[in-house]
Structure formats: C-alpha cells, structure tokens
Amino acid sequence: MVLIILFLCAYIVPSIVLNFLQITHIKSALKTKAILLDSLDYKKAGNYALENLMLDTIQKCVEFGLFVFWVVFGLSFFWQWLQEIGLNGAWHHIAFLLLLLLIPLLVTLPLSFYQTFSIDKRYGFCKQSVGLFFIDLLKTSLLSIILGGVIFYVLLWVMDSFSFWWLGGFVLMFGVVVVANAIYPTLIAPLFNKFTPLEDTELKSRIEELLDKVGFKSNGIFVMDASKRDGRLNAYFGGIGRTKRVVLFDTLLEKISKDGLLAILGHELGHFKHKDILKNLATTGVFLFALFFLAAHLPESFFAQASLPQESTTTLALIFLLSSVISFWFLPLVGYFSRKAEYRADAFGATLSSKQCLANALVRLINENKSFPSSHWLYICFYYSHPPLLERLRALDYEI
Ligand SMILES: [Zn+2]
C-alpha cells in the first residue's frame, strides 16, 4: 500500500495538478488579446495545447492503473508464470524485465494512436500513414528487446558479481548512455529516417563557414525526411566526438529563410560552445547515480508488498517502476539549468547572426509549430527545457 500511495502522492497527483494549472492558465490567456500569433493561430495553438494536456491527464491515470496492476498482481504473476513456462536462470530474469518494458508500450498504444491520428491530424501536423506508425512500433519493440536484453544481461551480472553492485550498475548504465549518444546519429536514427547530405551548395558553404567560425568539426550536414511523419520544424546537432553531425529537418528547409536557418544553427552552436551536451550527459549521470543509490536502499517491505523475492532482478523492476517518481522531482532542477543554457545559447547565436534575425526565426518557428506562447510559471518550472518564448524575445530586445 505504501508503494501505491507514494506513486500517487509524489507523482500522479502533482503532475495532474500541474496539468490543471496549465489548462486554467491557457483558458484565461485565450480570452485576452493574441500575442505573437494572429488571432486564429493563437486560438488554434491554445486549443492544441489544451487537447494535449487533457490527453496527458488521461495518460497519468492509465499510468497509475498500470502501477497498481504491477504491484498488486502483475509482478508476482509474471515472475511465476515465466518460470512455469520453462524459463529459468538468466532467461527468466531478462524476460521478466523485458515484459516490464513492453507491456506499458502496448497499454498506452491507444493513447499514442489517438494523439497522432486524431489530435495531430486535426491540427495539420500528422503526415504519416497508419502503416508507418505500426512499423515504427515494431522497430522500437525489437530494438528494446535486443538492446534491452543485452544490457539487462550485463547489468544483472555486474549486480551479482560485485559487492558495491549499485556503483558498478551506475558505471555500466552511464557508459551505455554515453555510447548511445555517440552511436545514435549514425546507427539508430537511420533505422527510422533517411539522412541525405545537404545538396544546396550555397547553403552548405554558408553553414560550413559558420561551423568553422566556432571550431565545430562535424562529419557532415544532413537533411532528414522528417516530413514523412510530422510537419513541425527542427534542427539538431547529434552525436558526440567524431560522430557529430548537423541534422536539418526537411520541413525546416522548406519553411524558413536561409538567414533564419543560420540563426537557429547559431543558437545550436551556442550549446556546443558552452559544452551543454556534455553538461546534459553529466546531469543524466547524476540522475542515474541517484537511481542506483536508491535501488540499493529500497526497504524490504516494498518487495513484500509486491510479493517478490528480494534479489537483483526484482530490485531493478521496482526501481524501474519508481523511476517516473524520481525523474519527476528531477525535472525542476534539470529545467532550471537547461533554461539558463538556452538564454546563453541565444546570446551566443545572436553574436553570429543578429538579435533581430534570431528573434524573427524563433517567432517563425512557434508560428509553424503552433506553440502556445504563454504558460503557468509552475508548469514552466517543471516541464520547460526552454524559457517561454516571450522571455527569450525580451532578452533579445525584440519588440512584442
Ligand atoms: Zn537550445
């Protein structure tokens, strides 16, 4: 019972309260004069945000239901059932942990389907077919089974072989995160999207000039076929070390001027200049450390409540179930540093283009992505990795 109350009071209730604060804020903002967007788009952006918040609230209730299911019945049932069907040793343990990963994916499937093919479709973002949606799901599940299986195998071995198992587990998982970041752009992302080298030679040489100015060594500028799924615009620098590449969404190339695009890349280069990618990795390290430390100090009563024996696999299962609670309380801290980093990246980006140019590009982005320009302060505090656009524009001396 304590486990369920903890999950409810420390995660589900506060996140639903945050959603309602944000819903009330947006509803009252919709009654005032439109800012940054024309009045029709302002209304559309507000309604889009409201529908997503309602859906997220339902999702939180489903998450709670699922948590209760696991603790009251699911964990002990699957633990025994997998043994009864003849799995033993490492196979039993790995299959148990994989079920814990895959079942939530299936349970929340109707919600993500509704988000993509109802909400996103109505607001003009969704460009993908139902077939592609299921192919993505299949690929994600297979990837989780293969990579998850291997990682769980090594992790359980570490946990069973060392006396300071939680420290060993932390080092291993942190290593996995670093490797995942390094291989993502070249090995994982191409499983889902096509990346083609940028063909526009004029734009390419302007981007290269910009990268040279900052000392950014990339292994290429690529265009990603994002438009096969979603109409929103974006660009990012993926990878670490030698695998770094510049990725531009095809939607961005289509809908933004070259000056605007260079201004956005200038902002991204600010993150590179300030080593924000490494700082983000370090933050993930702190989170993982906290997670493993808590795993080592889980009260025995938690295992009894879930009718599970106390051992490495069940410890991982419980800490996995509790990780949403822990990450929820990490959000304000991570968000605070992230928003500070965004201001710094804006300031740096503005020195490469100009304040006006970057501000115009940001306004263009929220217009295309239909982001609602105003939020409740507590919601910002938890969920915003970027400062609200109004604040960013003010910092760039933009006339609103
Ligand atoms: Zn940024």
Image (cartoon, grey):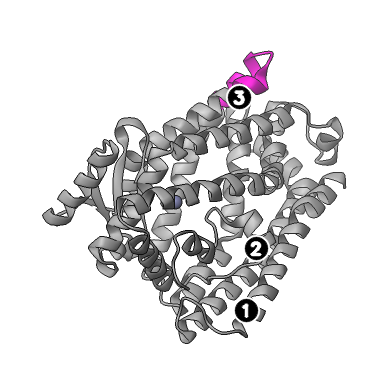
Q: Nearer the viewer, residue 365 or 294?
A: 365
Question: Of circles 1 and 2, which is in front?
Answer: 1
Q: Which residue is mark 2?
A: 59
> In which quadrant of the rendered view does residue 220 lie?
top left
Q: Residues within 10 Å of mark 2 (few under 14, many from 20)?
A: some
Q: Is residue 331 magenta?
A: no
Labelled pair 1, 2 in contact (Cβ < 8 Å): no
Distance from label 1 to label 2 (Cα)?
25 Å
Q: Position of residue 240 (x, y in %)?
A: 37, 34
Asked whether mark 2 lies closer than 8 Å to ligand 1, one says no
Q: Residues within 10 Å of mark 1 (few under 14, many from 20)?
A: some
At horizontal 62% and vertical 79% (from top left) the residue drawn is 29
Q: Nearer the viewer, residue 358 or 188?
A: 358
Q: Which mark is residue 169?
A: 3
User: Which structural element holds mark 1?
Assistant: helix
Q: Position of residue 393 (x, y in %)?
A: 47, 64
Labelled pair 3, 1 in contact (Cβ < 8 Å): no
Q: Give the residue type at disc 3.
A: Gly
**Residue 229 visible to an observer of this rendering:** no
Q: Nearer the viewer, residue 155 or 60?
A: 60
Asked whether mark 3 lies closer than 8 Å to ligand 1, one says no
| Sequence order check, earlier mark of 1 and 2 | 1
Q: Give the residue type at disc 2.
A: Gln
The magenta-colored residue range is: 153-169
| Sequence order check, earlier mark of 3 and 2 | 2
Q: Which mark is residue 29?
A: 1
Q: Nearer the viewer, residue 375 or 327?
A: 375
Question: Of circles 3 and 1, which is in front?
Answer: 1
Q: Position of residue 299 (x, y in %)?
A: 83, 32
**Residue 336 visible to an observer of this rendering:** yes
